[in-house]
Image: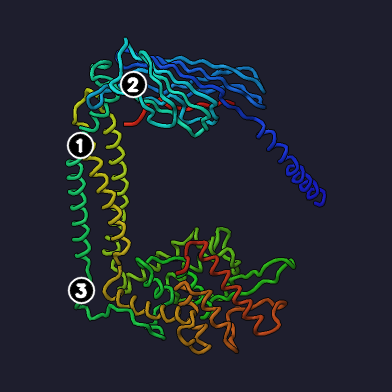
Amino acid sequence: MLRRWALTLVTIATVLALLPITGMAYAAKDYTAERYDVSIVMQPGGALEVTETVVFRFMGGPFTYVLREIPEDKTGGEVDVKWHFAQTSDTTHTFVLTYRALGVVFQGSGADVLEWDALPEDRSYAIGSSTVTLAYPGGLQPVSTPQVLGGRAQVGTGDGRATFTAQNLTDDDTLTIGAQFPLGSIVTAQPQWQQRRAFVAAGTSRAVPTGLLAFGGVLLAGLVGLALLWNSQRRSDTTGWGSSMALTSTPPGNLPPALATALTVNGATPSILQAVAALFDLARRGVVRIVELEARKWWGGRQYAIELLQQPSGLEPQEQGLLGILFQTKKGPRTSVKLDEFASQYTRRSKEFTQPLERELERRGLVDPARKQLRTRTSVAGFLALGLGIVLAAAGLAIGVAPGVSGTFTNFYIAAIMIGGGGALFLVGISALVVGAVLSPLTDRGDAQADQWRGFQKYLNDVTRGREMAPRLDAFDAYLPLAAGFGLLQQWGKAFSKQENAQVPAWFQGAAGSLRSATDSFGSFAAMTAAMHSSASSAGGGAAGGAAGGGGSSAG
């Protein structure tokens, strides 16, 4: 073990020692362009004959390639040009690239227009100097002096050409040139990319009202349907049950803790918190007990076990299911299970507890099966609308970019309807999920009882926060199952640990070797509740028109 640690430390030290050397090696590899000259010859019809001459100085190395990316915007397609060569360092190389860019000159407002990024926009090197020469076709002259549209350069004009010169350009500096010529002197019709943009713009402008109409119609229909659904499930004001939550310092009824706390959960959907509440209630009734195990190692944490003492008749169905989860295995029955296995056992077999509990809520007239089914269907419909809306909108976008220049506007109308309707369905789906989440499956009687139990839940919460006086000491054990079901287990234990003469419940037994006083006993119990809280949380219970050209260039 010591040798392994020593080797690890030596390795770390070696890596740290080599970092400065490695950094120097990478820092020594650099390159610049001493010159980047560009010759642009305009062709009748709007094409450009471009020749780029670049003189790279490589410092350090080695270098094995140079890359030039010619972008697709207004050029007919992206092209990557890559020169490969033998490893080289500390030298100068000249690279020459000639290419033809089609359909660059376009028809503007009263003129044929050229806009071109003469230098790569996306590059990682500086340029010492650059001379860009623009030659006009057939002695044609621009209607105004050519300009620098982006970057900085000096402009000179001569017979049938313009020259742009720049010095000391950083890797962020660009150079975009522009010139205008008499309308129709270079191009007699819009280039394809310009026709495409005009076609898309016209189709979009025509189809937008249709898309808005589809969006508004679907959204209105969906929201009206949800409003009617919500109104049909509105609580009656003549039931005689109260609807306000009033704080109460005593339990409002004698419901089993798992049932009482499940009523306060959104949708009356039980979780592991209700299982913990049922477990502590069984412990209070002498069915099970929780004991602290003797630690086997001096550095080991506290460990606990749940032990089955008896299995009397007359247990609630959910209680029988919980005991089955804990003590019935594939290998047969057992009488003890470690506390840290509680969450994993519950997660795998939770239906054995939750389904009987849900049926018991229905049997007692607290949950309406029809309302519960409607809640589920509303949520499912929300997910379906959400997914269908995304699919429709995505398909509409695909159709919208599909038509060619010579196509019709039909696709734009179809795309607008699909995008508008899909967007509306997406919003309706979200609204349906919200309605499904807040739609209560409780009967009027169950809703009234839920309000009363929430008032008691608020009281317990206020006690843990010091806003209410703590009840008598024996209430600690009596209210513990309810506090656990409300998600207040750890806070409830802390609130009573601060009181004098606080005693742990009789069903809890600390390890004999770790208990020297009542304080030690309560500390062991508090550690158990913290472990149970952590276990429940882990199981999901919780608590409360631009320029063309440019492109990139690099070397390596």
Amino acid type shown at disc 2: Val
Residue 186, horizontal then vertical, whole percent: 28, 16
Q: Which residue is at a point 32% across and 46% down the rendered structure image?
A: 387
Residue nearer the viewer, 193 or 274: 193
Q: Identify which residue is drawn at 42% across, 18% down.
A: 133
- Evaluate whether residue 404 shows in this view: no
How many angstroms separate mark 2 from mark 3 (CA)?
72 Å
Q: Which secondary structure, mark 1?
A: helix
What x and y, as percent, mark residue 409?
Answer: 19, 30
Q: Which residue is mark 2?
A: 104
Left or right position of 48 against 472 = left
Type of colouring: rainbow
Q: Amino acid at mark 1?
A: Ser
Q: Of 389 and 412, which appears nearest the observer?
A: 412
- Residue that numbered label 1 is attached to: 205
Which residue appears at 27% of the width and 60% of the height? 374
- Could you tell me which secondary element the residue under label 3 belongs to? loop
**Quick check: 79 left or right of 178?**
right
Q: Name the residue that disc number 3 marks.
A: 236
